Image (tube, rainbow, N blue to C red):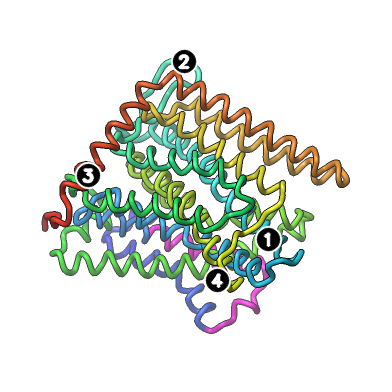
Amino acid sequence: MLGRLRHPLSAVGATTLLTLPWVFVWATGNAHSLGHLETVAISGVAVLGASFMLAWAAETAEKDVPRAFAIAVLAVLAVAPEYAVDALYAWQAGAAAGTPEGLEAANLAVANMTGANRILIGLGWSGIALFTVYRARNSADPAVVRESGFLKSKVKLDRDLATEIAFLLAATVFAFFVPLGGGIGMVDTLVLVGLYAIYIGIIIRGDVEDHEEQVGVPAYLQSFSKGPRIASVLLLFGYSGAMIYTAVHPFASGLESLGLALGIPPFFMIQWLAPLASESPELIVVAYLVNKARSTAGFNALISSKLNQWTLLIGTIAVVYSVAAGTIGKLPFDEKQQAEIWITAAQSFFALAVLTNFEISVREAVVLLVLFVSQVVAEFWVIQTMAEPAASDLSLLMLHGYTVLYIVIGAVLFVTRRDEVRAIADRTAANVRNAISRGSEPVEHAD
C-alpha cells in the first residue's frame, strides 16, 4: 500500500499515523490500562511503521556514509529493544547477586540472549533467503541465481561482507570459550566489544560507494541538499528508534501474557517468544529491502545485526550485572545455559561456513531452518510432556547433540571451502590496512 501512494511524503505520513496511537498511549501513561490483545495490536502496528522509517533512513544515509556503516546503525537501532530486555534481567541478577533469585535472573538473561541470536539465524537468515528466491519470481533481483534441480537456486551475497564474516567468525570462536570461565565477565566484554569497536573503526573509514538508484521516500530525501538530507536521516533514525525502543517491550510482554493464557511455559517464552518480538523490527526492515529487490542490502543488515548482538549484547549484560552488583563480577549461569551458549556458537559457526562462498542456496536455507525449528519444537515437547528431572536431562542431551551436529557440518564446509576462507581473510586484512592508511583523513561525500 505504501508503495502505491503518489507522493513520497504521503508514505511518511501513513507510517507516522501507524505510530500515533502508541505515542498517545505511551505519552499519557495509559499502557497499563490496555488489555493484552490491545497492547499487542497498538504497539505492534507502531513497530511496523517505525521499521519502514528505519529502512528509509538507512537507504537515504547511503549517499553520505559508507553503506556498511549506515546498515550497522540500522542494525543497532533495530535490535536495541533486545538489549533493553537483556539488560533488565542482568540488572536484576546483579542486584540479587549470590541468591537463588539472582541466579534465576542471570539464567533468564542468557536464555534471552541465546534465543535472540539463534532466531536471527534460524528464522532470519534462512527465512529471508527463501523469501528472496520466492520474491525473485516477480522481480528482477540480480542477487538471485536460478538453478535447475531441487533446492539449488541461490542468493549471491556482496563480497564486501568479508569483513563482517571475518569478525563474526572471530567472535564465534571466542564464544565457545565463554562458558569455561564460569560466567560472562569483563574479559569477555573487553574482547567482544573490542572486536566490534575495531570493526566499526574499519567500516567508518571506508569509501562512500556509488549507491544504488533509489525510489520512493529514499530517492526523494536524497534529492535534498546535504544539510536537510542529513537532518531528515537523523530525524527518521531518532523517531523510529524511539518508537521501537518504547513499543517492542510492551509488544513482547503482551505476547508473553497471551502465551501464558495458552499454557506456554514462562521460561520458554522468555527464550523464544520475547526475542522473536524484539527481533521483529529487523526482520520487517529486511523483508522490505528484499521486496524492493535489494536483497544484498537486506543480508548486509542481517549479518550486521548478528555481529552486534554476538558482541555488544554479551558485553552489555556483563557490564550491567557488575554495575547492579556494585562490584566487577561475572554474570553466572547454570549447566543448561552453558549448553545454550555452546549451541548458539555452533549454529553461528555452521551459518558462517555456509556464507564462505558468498551465497546461500535454498537447500542450505532449508537446513538452517529445519535444524533450528526441530530443536525448539523437540525441546518444547520434552518440557510439556516429561516430568523433572528427566525433562531437563533429555533437554540438555539434545542441546549437546545439536551442538555437535552444527560443528561437524560447519567443519566439513570450512575444510571443503578453505580457499574461500583464505580469500575472506586476505580481503579483511586488506580492508584493515586501507583503514589504517587512511588514518584520520576525512571521507569525501558527494552532495
**Horizontal and vertical percent position of residue 5:** 32, 58
**Horizontal and vertical percent position of residue 151:** 49, 22
Instruction: Answer whether residue 247 is visible to the viewer in this image.
Output: yes
Q: The residue tagged with tag 4: helix, strand or loop? A: helix
In the image, the segment drawn in magenta is: 28-52
**Horizontal and vertical percent position of residue 404:** 63, 29
Q: Going from the N terminus, do you reach mark 2 or mark 4 first?
A: 2
**Gap in angstroms between the C-alphas marked 3 and 4:** 44 Å
Q: Going from the N terminus, do you reach mark 4 or mark 1 first?
A: 1
Q: Going from the N terminus, do you reach mark 2 or mark 3 first?
A: 2
Label number found at residue 256: 1
Q: The residue tagged with tag 1: helix, strand or loop? A: helix
Q: Mark 3 points at which residue?
A: 212
Q: Going from the N terminus, do you reach mark 1 or mark 2 first?
A: 2
Q: Residue furthest top?
A: 149
Q: The residue tagged with tag 2: helix, strand or loop? A: loop
